[in-house]
Amino acid sequence: MLLEAPNGMAAWDIGEIKNTTDLDTAADVRIADQGPVRASITIKRSFSKSLFTQSVVLYDAIPRIDFPCKVAWRENRQPR
């Protein structure tokens, strides 16, 4: 995660990066599906009050991998 310095065009331009935080902390990993058509695992991580949920979905007869992600972002904006 990047903490950016406030700037006038924050929606379009990335400002000076003031701090970084790694989000690769311990995760809860579980098998979600294990069948003849598809198999998937679900990975849950937290950061402060926020929760990140990602799945890795593999298909038997389709050459693709899906990575659906959900983020419940519950952080407050930093004061200026």
Image: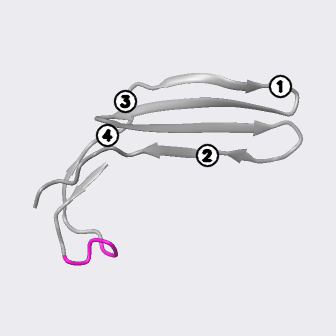
Q: Secondary structure at mark 4?
A: loop
Asked if disc 4 and disc 3 are in contact, CB closer than 8 Å, the reply is: yes
Q: Earlier in the sequence, mark 2 or mark 4?
A: 4
Name the disc covering residue 57, or none.
none
Horizontal relation, residue 52 to residue 21: left or right: right
**Residue shown at 27% from the left, 71% from the top:** 10
Going from N to C along the chain, the mark reached first, 2 or 1, is: 1
Name the residue furthest left: 80
Q: Kindly identify which residue carries mark 1.
A: 35
Q: Residue at x 61, y 37 (%)?
A: 55
Q: Are marks 2 and 1 in contact (CB under 8 Å)?
A: no
**In magenta segment, residue 42:** no
Residue 18 percent location from the top left of the image: 16, 56
Q: Nearer the viewer, mark 4 or mark 1?
A: 1
Q: What's the amino acid at mark 1?
A: Gly
According to the image, label 3 marks what residue? 25
Please tell me the numbered disc located at residue 68. 2
Query: Element type at marker 3?
Result: loop
